[in-house]
Amino acid sequence: MSVIPSTSYEGLPYLDQVKIEVGVEPDVALLRLETGEIHLMGDPPPGAEWTRISNDPAWQDRIEIQPQVSTIYIAINVTWPPFDNVLVRRALNHAIDKERIIQLLNGRGTVANQILPPLMPGYDPDYKGYDYNPEKAKALLAEAGYPDGFETSIECIAVEPQPKLCESFQEDLAQIGIKLTINTLAAPNVIDDAGNGRTPLTWSGGLAWIQDYPDPDDFYGPILGCDSNVPGGWNWSRYCNKELHAKAMELLTITDREKRLQGYKELFRALMDDAVWVPIFNGVYTVAHSEKLRGEATLTHPEHSLRYETMWLEQ
Amino acid sequence: MAVASSDLQERESAKPTTCAIDARVAEHIVVSDSYLTMTWRRLRRDRAAMLGAVLIGLIVLAAIFAPVLSPHDPTKQYRDGLTKGGQPVPSTLVTDGSLRFPLGTDPNGRDLLSRILYGARVSLIVGVLANALAVAIGTFIGSVAGFFGNPLETILMRFTDIMMAFPTLLLAMTLVAILKPSMWIIILVIGLVYWTWIARVIYGQVVALRERDFVVASRALGSPRSYTLTRHILPQLVPTIIVWGTLGIATNVMLEASLSYLGIGVQPPTPSWGGIIQQGQSFYRTAPWLVIFPGLAIMVTIFAFNLLGDGLRDALDPSQKGRL
C-alpha cells in the first residue's frame, strides 16, 4: 500500500511517498530494518530480540517506548459452568502469576490488578485486587466444590508472544488442579468464538482492549455492558448485570467529574468482585525505526494513527 | 485337498508326517527360519544398518527412561529458567559443578534437555504407530486390489491415485484442523495420508505374484481365494512390509515434526521436537540452541531409521540391492 500527499494541502508532509507493507513477520521486519530496507516497524520488536537491541547503545535512538492505555486480560465466560460460580472465577484471579507474564514480555508491560489501566481517569490506585496466591485459589476451588480441579480450555491467537503466555497460564492453573487446554487460532476465529460464547476462557492478548476514547466507559460499555452482550459482541465474559448496568447508564449522564469518576470506581470494584476477568497487564508500546527517521516516531502506531505527515528522513 | 497336499509333501520333504497340513506348516517354519537366519547374518555384516539399529536402540532407551534421565520436569516453567529480561538461559555451570540446565532453557523457562528426551516419546510413538497403521491399510488395499483383479483393482488403485494426488502435508493439515489436534488424532491422520505409497508397492508385487506357479497351484487345488491370499501371498510380502515398516517411520517422524512445527501437532505442554523448534525459532539469533538440539534429534532419528531400513532391504532381498 502506498500513501502519497494530497495536492490540495500545503506545507506538510515532508515525505513524497510512504510505502506500507502488511503481512510481514516481526522477525523479518526487524532484519529488514537492520539491513536498511525499511525505516519503521509496524509491530513491536519481537521478544527474542528485544533484550539485545534495548541493551545495545547503537539502538538507543532508534527505539521508542510508550505506555499504552490498555488492559490485557483473560475473559471468563460467566455462563459457562463451572465459571458461573463466582468462587471459581475468584480462584482463577488468585492463581495467575502476573509477574511471570511481565518477565515473558521482557518487561514490556506492568501488572494489572483492575479493569481500568492506570492512565485512564477513574483508575483506583487504592484498589489492591487479587494477589497471587495459589493456596487461596485452591481453597476457593474446594469451597466451590472442585477440590480436585476440573478441565477447561482457553483460546489464544497464534501470534507470538501470545501462545507462550497461554502456556504460562496453563502451568499456573495446573498448580491448582485445573487442566487447561490451549486452543491457538487465527485472530478472527478467536474473536468469532469469544463473541458468540463458544469458549470458556479467552486470552485478549493481541486483540483487546486498548482505549478508543479517554473515558472509563470505554472499558465498560463495549466490553462488559449488557448492550455488548450480544452475538458477535466484544463482551467476551458474556456478562450482563442489570443492576450495575442501570448504574453505568446513569453515570453516562453525570457531568460532575469527581462524582462521576467515583461512580466508575465503584462500578469497576463491583465488576472485580464479580471477577468477570483476570486482568493481567497494562501494555507498553515499543517501536523500532531507522537512524534516518525523524519526527514524531513516538506517536506512530501504524494501525491506529497514521502520523506519517510529521516524519522526515535525514539524508 | 488334504490328499493333494500330502502328495506335494511327499515330493518336497523327507520328513515323516502324521497330518498333511501340519507338515506343510512345519516345512514353512523351517524355510522361514533359515531365511531369517540368513537375513540376520547379512544385516549384521552391514555396518551402516547396525549403526542405525544402535542409534534407534539409544533413542528408544532415551524415550523409555526419560523420567530417569531428565534433569527436570519437562513442563515445569522455572523462575531461574529465564533471564531478568525474559530471555532463555543458555547451558550454564552452577556453583556445585553440575549443569543447572544442560542444554539451556526454552522461551518459557523449561529445561530443553528434558523436553527433548520426553519429545522422543512422542516422535517414536507417532512414528511407529502411524506407520503401522499406514502399512496395514496400504497392505490391505494393495493386496486386495492386486489379487482380486477388476473391478476392485480399478476402484481401489484409482482411489489410491486420487489420494496420492493430494499433497501429503496439506491433506494432513486439513484433516487435523477438522478433527482437533491430539497425539492419537495425529497418528490416525498420518496413517490415513501415508498408506498410498505402500499400497502401490504391495499392489505391484501382488500382481506379479498372482501369476506365479505356487499361487496358481493353490487356486487349482481349490483353496478359497482368501486362503491363498493370506497363506501364500502375504508371507511373500513380509520383506517389503518390514522394509516399509522401518523406512516409513523416518518419513512419519518428519511429518509429525512438521505438523507440530505448524502448531497443529501434539499440543502443549506435551513436548515434541517440531513444537520445540516452532516455539524457539524466533530466538535463532539470540538462543540458537532452541533450534539446533531438537533439529539434531529429528535428524539423527530419521537418519537411524533410514540406515536400518536400507540395510534391512538389502539383507532381506540381496537381489534387490540398491532398488525399491
Image: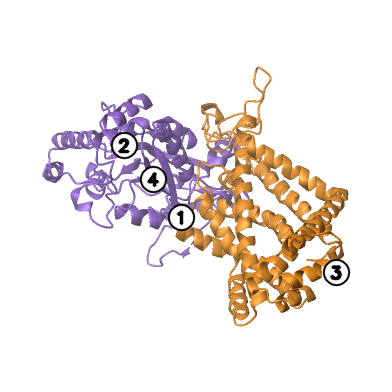
x%, y% of residue A233? 27, 55
Determine the CA span between mark 2 and mark 3: 99 Å
**Pick the front one: B137 or B53:** B137
Q: Write the residue at 64% across / 74% down.
A: B224
Q: Amino acid at mark 1?
A: Lys
User: Left or right: B110 with respect to A299?
Assistant: right
Residue B279 seen in this snapshot: yes
Disc marking residue A119? 2
Given residues A53 and B238, the one toward you in this image is B238
**Are the residues flagged by discs 4 and 3 from a single subunit?**
no
Say the numbered circle drawn on residue B180. Answer: 1
Q: State the residue position of label 4.
A: A153
Question: What is the spatial separation of the Cα atoms under label 1 and label 4, in whole angstroms?
Answer: 13 Å
Residue type at mark 4 is Ser
Describe residue B9's horizontal placement relative to residue B199 as left or right. Answer: right
- Chain identifier, orange in the render: B
